[in-house]
Amino acid sequence: MGERVPVYVPCDIDGALRERLARGGVVLLVGDSTAGKSRAAYEAMIATLPDHVLIAPQGRSAVAAALAQASEVRRCVLWLNDLERYLGTDGLTRTGIARVLGGAGHHRVILATLRAAEQARLTGAPATQDEAGRLAYELVRDTG
């Protein structure tokens, strides 16, 4: 018999999260491990964007193909659960984000989650940040 998914318990951020998804662009949820970020993101996505194509790369090596696909689809969600797995020169970059979100006549969302511990690690002192850290910092800052 298949596993049953527990009933979703609404949380305080649901309304704001759905509004952000409806606007499009980058939506980043940051929180502690097992806080419910992924489930809240999923529930908001299916409630708000049921007609969008879901694109979910299976790792950093699949990001380039996912970005190319997302930039060709008018209505899509690029799902990046545990964002740190996708960041870096060979993964998600500012250029890739700009390609997906640029232009007009579409509604595209990059929906990502990031554990608070990873946010702290990636957005540490600017002098020691690599490209992944800078990108995570900018995403957190710009979507806050």
Image (cartoon, rainbow, N blue to C red):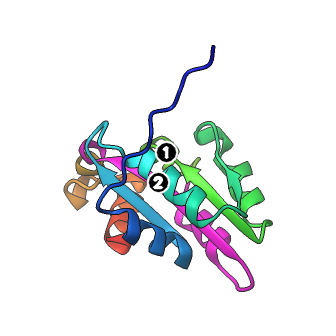
Q: Is residue 129 left or right of residue 20?
A: left
Mark seen at residue 81: 1
Q: Position of residue 13 (x, y in %)?
A: 33, 63
| Residue 10 visible somewhere in the drawing | yes
Q: Position of residue 90 (x, y in %)?
A: 59, 47
| Residue 88 visible somewhere in the drawing | no
Q: Are marks 2 and 1 in contact (CB under 8 Å)?
A: yes
Q: Is residue 74 left or right of residue 5?
A: right
Question: Which region shows up in magenta?
Answer: 92-118
Q: Which residue lies at the image location 63% right of the left edge and 37% below the top edge?
A: 58
Q: Between marks 2 and 1, how big is the CA–CA gap?
A: 9 Å
Q: Quadrant of residue 84?
A: top left
Q: Which residue is mark 2?
A: 41
Magenta stretch holds residue 101? yes
Q: Nearer the viewer, residue 74 or 120?
A: 74
Q: In the displayed image of the protein, which residue is found farthest to the right?
A: 72
Disc count in the image? 2
